[in-house]
């Protein structure tokens, strides 16, 4: 890939790095640029990208849990209809006291993403207004999308198995027991033993 | 005299909508003054499930995220994995994938024709269009073995090549659908009742549409020429000849017209795929799936589904399982913040009509 193709992507990184000192960016490929910022800078970078650089469309907000590094990564994905570049703004927040500023005054629909991340990861968005519950109702356990939430453990502690399903046996064996009929030859090869 | 506001719980079942969601409406008389979307009826935890399954096992469940249109899920997941891993896809597979995507768009629009008219009481249309959709499902069945969920587009290419005589069947089906479109015009688009119901309701401000997160047909109906197939080209869309229709009304009627014109474009694209498809391999074999690891990295891929930009954000930590797969369907914005906004001032009878015109799909809001 030649330099001319990645021209606008490189210009974008330069511009952002000049405007915000504590920002580092790189071009991933054509139409994909990623920058990392401190969490305090996120609202400023987002509103600068929206109002000055033409990144008016918020495509996505995602969250990734990295318990081994003791942090959460929040990713804001923006799109510029004019430049046709997808801009990733990534920030790390501490897992012990996870909080970050709310950005739904910049894009209204950020509210939905933030409400979901709040209940799935337990991250507080300062200033977020909106119904507390989005998907989970009356949930008082650990936020379920965290990596250390053990789904099997949760099921074992909260649900009981219906009688008759404990062994999860082969249904054909049960049929033979009840009817006394033999399994036809063509079905035998699928038998578990 | 100002009437007293009453709360009306609409849903969770809606005509023409696959899946469940509830809208809490505050109404004065029969006019909506406030709307609030409540989801939580079908959270199945796909994203958590995928963190516990290896890369190929996760592929088998992604298609189940969205019932009316499972193929963009398969495609996005596969493309994200291929992008992170740097795996090349044979050219013929790219053509077959494009054909699948367009067939899936046709099937999805046929279902939508039914849903949109089912919510206004024109019940002949669902009978016709859902019946016609079955001919496309027959094609899917022959090609992939599954009618609704295909598990066909997978990392590295597609699962198998087209069977003998399949191309002819596709072309015959396209001829049939083209003929049927004229019938749909007579029944739906030339129908004064549908026109009067649809014109001028569910208006989205074109100046704010991009900022509000509107994508796909509703955005093009607002006069903005935006289509992932052109803006961020994927597969072999740059080798196909097609137009992106736009309208200026930004109401339910314009959105219906957009889908009708795109229906023609998709038929033409399927024909072009069959005509220009090169010969060759269709699958770049992956290693033993149980030992298959993907290098650390992340990717956001998007595809133009029948309802708009469908995105997948996939993160790998270098292991044999995804660290995170985050699905963003267009309904995540259309069904929540946008719907809450544009329902204000609408008539109660128009609520499900407007919901349908946005292509609201609750399964992708909750996943």
Image: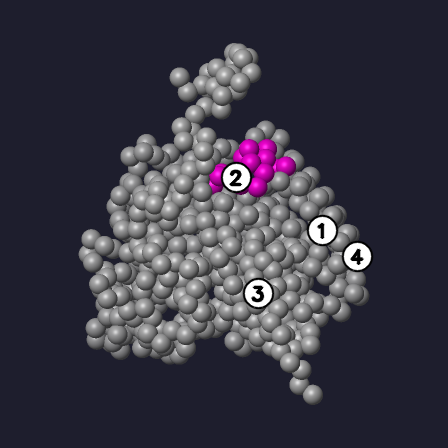
- The first of marks 4 and 1 along the sequence is 1
Whole-angstrom CA distance, mark 4 to mark 2, is 33 Å
Whole-angstrom CA distance, mark 1 to mark 2, is 23 Å
Check if mark 3 and mark 4 are on a common chain: yes
Label ID, residue B200: none
Read off the residue under disc 2.
B150
Q: Quadrant of residue B247?
A: bottom right
Instruction: Give the residue displayed 56% in from the left and 61% down from the top.
Output: B22
Indicate the position of residue B329 as horizontal and vertical percent values.
48, 57
The answer to whether residue B274 is seen in the rendering is yes
Local secondary structure at mark 4: helix
Q: Is residue B153 left or right of residue A2?
A: right
Q: Quadrant of residue B148?
A: top right
Read off the residue under disc 4.
B186
Local secondary structure at mark 2: loop
Read off the residue under disc 1.
B126
Whole-angstrom CA distance, mark 1 to mark 3, is 24 Å
Q: Tell me, yes or no, whether the two marked residues, 1 and 3, touch with CB atoms within 8 Å.
A: no
Whole-angstrom CA distance, mark 3 to mark 4, is 33 Å
Indicate the position of residue A142 as horizontal and vertical percent values.
31, 56
- The first of marks 1 and 2 along the sequence is 1
User: Which marked residue is nearer to the observer: mark 1 or mark 2?
Assistant: 1
Residue B157 or residue B300, whichever sits in front = B300
């Amino acid at each position: 890939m030649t330099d001319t193709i990645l021209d606008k992507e490189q210009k974008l990184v330069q511009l952002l790095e000049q405007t915000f000192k504590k920002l580092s960016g790189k071009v991933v490929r054509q139409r994909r640029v990623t920058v990392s910022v401190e969490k305090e800078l996120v609202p400023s970078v987002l509103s600068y990208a929206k109002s000055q650089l033409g990144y008016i469309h918020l495509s996505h907000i995602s969250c990734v849990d990295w318990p081994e590094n003791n942090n959460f990564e929040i990713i804001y994905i923006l799109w510029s209809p004019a430049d046709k570049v997808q801009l990733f703004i990534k920030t790390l927040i501490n897992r012990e006291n996870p909080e970050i500023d709310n950005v739904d005054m910049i894009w209204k629909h950020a509210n939905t993403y933030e409400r979901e991340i709040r209940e799935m990861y337990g991250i507080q968005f300062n200033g977020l207004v909106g119904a507390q519950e989005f998907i989970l109702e009356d949930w008082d356990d650990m936020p379920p999308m965290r990596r250390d939430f053990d789904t099997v453990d949760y099921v074992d502690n909260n649900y009981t198995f219906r009688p008759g399903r404990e062994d999860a046996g082969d249904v054909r064996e049960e049929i033979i027991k009840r009817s006394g009929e033999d399994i036809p030859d063509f079905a035998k090869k699928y038998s578990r033993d | 005299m100002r009437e007293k506001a009453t709360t009306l719980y609409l849903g969770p079942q809606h005509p023409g909508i696959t899946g469940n969601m509830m809208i809490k409406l505050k109404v004065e008389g029969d006019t909506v003054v406030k709307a609030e979307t409540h989801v939580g009826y079908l959270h199945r935890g796909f994203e958590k499930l995928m963190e516990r399954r290896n890369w190929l096992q996760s592929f088998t469940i992604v298609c189940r995220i969205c019932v009316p249109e499972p193929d963009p899920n398969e495609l996005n997941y596969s493309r994200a994995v291929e992008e992170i891993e740097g795996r090349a896809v044979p050219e013929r597979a790219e053509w077959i994938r494009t054909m699948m995507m367009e067939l899936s768009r046709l099937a999805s629009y046929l279902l939508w024709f039914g849903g949109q008219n089912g919510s206004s009481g024109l019940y002949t249309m669902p009978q016709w269009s859902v019946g016609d959709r079955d001919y496309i499902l027959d094609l899917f069945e022959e090609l992939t073995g599954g009618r609704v969920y295909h598990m066909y587009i997978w990392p590295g290419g597609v699962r198998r090549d087209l069977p003998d005589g399949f191309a002819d069947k596709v072309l015959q089906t396209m001829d049939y659908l083209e003929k049927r479109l004229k019938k749909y015009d007579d029944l739906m688009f030339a129908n004064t009742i549908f026109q009067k119901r649809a014109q001028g309701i569910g208006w989205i401000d074109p100046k704010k549409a991009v900022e509000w997160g509107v994508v796909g047909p509703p955005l093009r109906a607002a006069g903005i020429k935006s289509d992932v197939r052109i803006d961020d080209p994927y597969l072999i869309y740059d080798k196909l000849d097609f137009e992106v229709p736009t309208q200026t009304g930004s109401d339910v009627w314009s959105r219906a017209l957009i889908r009708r014109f795109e229906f023609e474009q998709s038929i033409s694209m399927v024909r072009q795929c069959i005509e220009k498809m090169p010969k060759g391999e269709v699958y770049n074999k992956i290693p033993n799936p149980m030992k298959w690891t993907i290098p650390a990295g992340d990717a956001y891929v998007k595809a133009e589904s029948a309802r708009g930009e469908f995105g997948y954000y996939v993160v790998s930590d270098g292991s044999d399982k995804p660290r995170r797969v985050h699905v963003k369907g267009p309904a995540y914005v259309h069904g929540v913040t946008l719907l809450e906004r544009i329902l204000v001032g609408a008539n109660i009878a128009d609520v499900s009509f407007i919901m349908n015109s946005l292509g609201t799909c609750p399964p992708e809001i909750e996943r």
